[in-house]
Every structure is written in structure tokens, then in C-alpha cells.
């Protein structure tokens, strides 16, 4: 089987999945780095509450997460109505909304990977940089971030793979619109609901599997090269 054997609708589902995953990581990864840094290094009131909020998508059913996003970012939701009225931005039932729902579900996985990488860094290295006059931002950019790079890279790949497989939150918040919000899992579900759609579902499942394996293998290769580059 090759991509050439896929129908235009199936290729569209592949394209939507890749777009959703890339957009979710582009927005979510910097936020995950900040959240992981706050949880790993921060000492402030509300840290426990932030930790619980960040990891809530891991324990909540994806449909519940999608429903909460719908309440907040829907046309009648407090944030969604403001964005729509003030900027003409609508997230519900759009590709951006699908990326948002998938990114929220993948966010705790990214934060956890980055936080573990930050916890593994020897604090004496940061203290040495501070004793030499490096400020907080300088220490982060020249010491902490390079040493945490393998974890950040792993977070990006794992998060991307998680976005490719997200179903419940996406279909609840963004629906299943072919060519717009219909990702691979949603296309597979739609195919299985159609008489004689087993062959289509099998093709899409194979494509999903191949993309996920390529992403994970690529993550391992890049992580090894990154560790070699920083001398770890």
C-alpha cells in the first residue's frame, strides 16, 4: 500500500491529521516548556493546583475535555464569544479547534517529558552560571535549555504522536467535518460506520501506524544525536 492508493478524501484526512499535530505542537510546546520549568524550579503559592490542572487531561475522559473546551471556547462560551466578537476568531468546528483539542490532551505528556529532563540536570551547573553573573534568562537559554533539549525533543515527538491518535476531544469540540476537522481516527471511525468501509478503515489504520512509527523512530535518532552534540 502507498499514499498513491488513497482516495482524495483519505489523503485529506492524512493532511488534516498532520496539520492538526503540527499546529498543536507549535503552540503547545513553548507553553509546555514554561509549565515544566515552573513545576520543576518554581516555589510559589498554587504550584500544586497548577500541577493538578496541567495533568487533568490524563485522568479526565477525552469527551469531557472536549465538552469543557466547548463550554469555554464555543460561540456562546465566555472566551469563544469574546474571540469571535473582538477578533472574528472562531475555534469550534475548525481545524484550529481540532488542533487545540488535540494539543490540550497531549499537553501533560509534553510537560512530563520536559520536567523529567529538567529534574535530571545538575543544579550545580546553573549555580555556576549564576555565580559568573548570568541572569535567569541567560542561564535558561545557555545552560538549562540546551541540557534539556533531548527531553524537549522527545516531548515534541510524543506530543505529535498523541495528537495523531486523539479522538474524543477532537470530535466533541471540532466535530467530524471531512477535509476540515476529520483526522485519521475520525476518518477510520466514519469508515467503520459505513457498510463496506472496512477496507478504507484498514488503509487509514495502516497509514496512521506508519506515521506514528516513523515519528517515534525519528525521535530516538534525533535524541541520540542531540545528546551526542551536547556531550551527554
Image (cartoon, grey):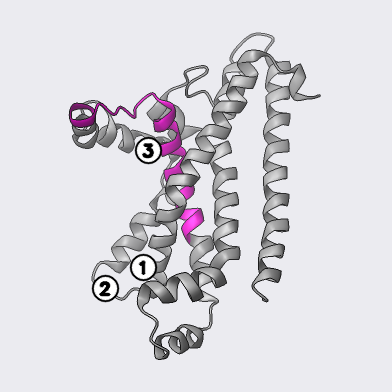
- Which residue is under mark 3? 64
Which badge, 1 or 2, comes first in the chain's sequence?
1
Reply yes or no: does residue 97 show up in magenta. Answer: yes
Residue 221 position within the rendered picture, expressed as x and y whole percent measured from the top left: 73, 57
Q: Is 222 located above or below residue 17 in the figure?
A: below
Q: Are marks 1 and 2 in contact (CB under 8 Å)?
A: yes
Q: Is residue 2 left or right of residue 198?
A: right
Magenta segment range?
84-111
- Specify the quadrant that holds the C terminus: bottom right
| Whole-number angstrom distance, CA of label 1 to CA of label 3 | 26 Å
Magenta span includes 104 = yes
* Alpha-carbon span between mark 1 and mark 2: 9 Å
* Magenta span main SS: helix
Q: Which residue is mark 1?
A: 38
Residue 107 screen position, x and y as percent: 45, 50
Nearest the eye: 56 or 101: 101
Q: Earlier in the sequence, mark 1 or mark 3?
A: 1
Residue 74's disc is none
Query: Looking at the image, which residue sits at the far front?
Result: 133
Q: Is residue 47 left or right of residue 62?
A: left
Q: Quarter holding the N terminus?
A: top right
Residue 44 image label: 2
Residue 192 is left or right of residue 81, and the answer is right
Which residue occupies the extreme top position in the image? 195
In this view of the protein, can residue 105 be seen by the observer? no
- Badge 1 element: helix
Amino acid at each position: 500500500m502507498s499514499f498513491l492508493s488513497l482516495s482524495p478524501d483519505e489523503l485529506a484526512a492524512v493532511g488534516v491529521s498532520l496539520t492538526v499535530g503540527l499546529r498543536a505542537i507549535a503552540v503547545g510546546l513553548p507553553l509546555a516548556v514554561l509549565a515544566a520549568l515552573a513545576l520543576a524550579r518554581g516555589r510559589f503559592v498554587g504550584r500544586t493546583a497548577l500541577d493538578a490542572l496541567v495533568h487533568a487531561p490524563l485522568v479526565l475522559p477525552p469527551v469531557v475535555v472536549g465538552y469543557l473546551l466547548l463550554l469555554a471556547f464555543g460561540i456562546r462560551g465566555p472566551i469563544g464569544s469574546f474571540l469571535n466578537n473582538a477578533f472574528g476568531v472562531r475555534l469550534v468546528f475548525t481545524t484550529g479547534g481540532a488542533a487545540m483539542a488535540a494539543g490540550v490532551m497531549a499537553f501533560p505528556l509534553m510537560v512530563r517529558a520536559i520536567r523529567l529532563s529538567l529534574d535530571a540536570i545538575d543544579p550545580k551547573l546553573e549555580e555556576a552560571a549564576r555565580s559568573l553573573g548570568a541572569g535567569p534568562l541567560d542561564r535558561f537559554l545557555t545552560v538549562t535549555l540546551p541540557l534539556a533539549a533531548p527531553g524537549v525533543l522527545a516531548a515534541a515527538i510524543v506530543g505529535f504522536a498523541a495528537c495523531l491518535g486523539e479522538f474524543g476531544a477532537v470530535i466533541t469540540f471540532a466535530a467530524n467535518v471531512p477535509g476540515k476537522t476529520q483526522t485519521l481516527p475520525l476518518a477510520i471511525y466514519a469508515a467503520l460506520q459505513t457498510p463496506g468501509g472496512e477496507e478504507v478503515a484498514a488503509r487509514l489504520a495502516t497509514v496512521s501506524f506508519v506515521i506514528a512509527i516513523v515519528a517515534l523512530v525519528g525521535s530516538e535518532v534525533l535524541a541520540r544525536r542531540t545528546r551526542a552534540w551536547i556531550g551527554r
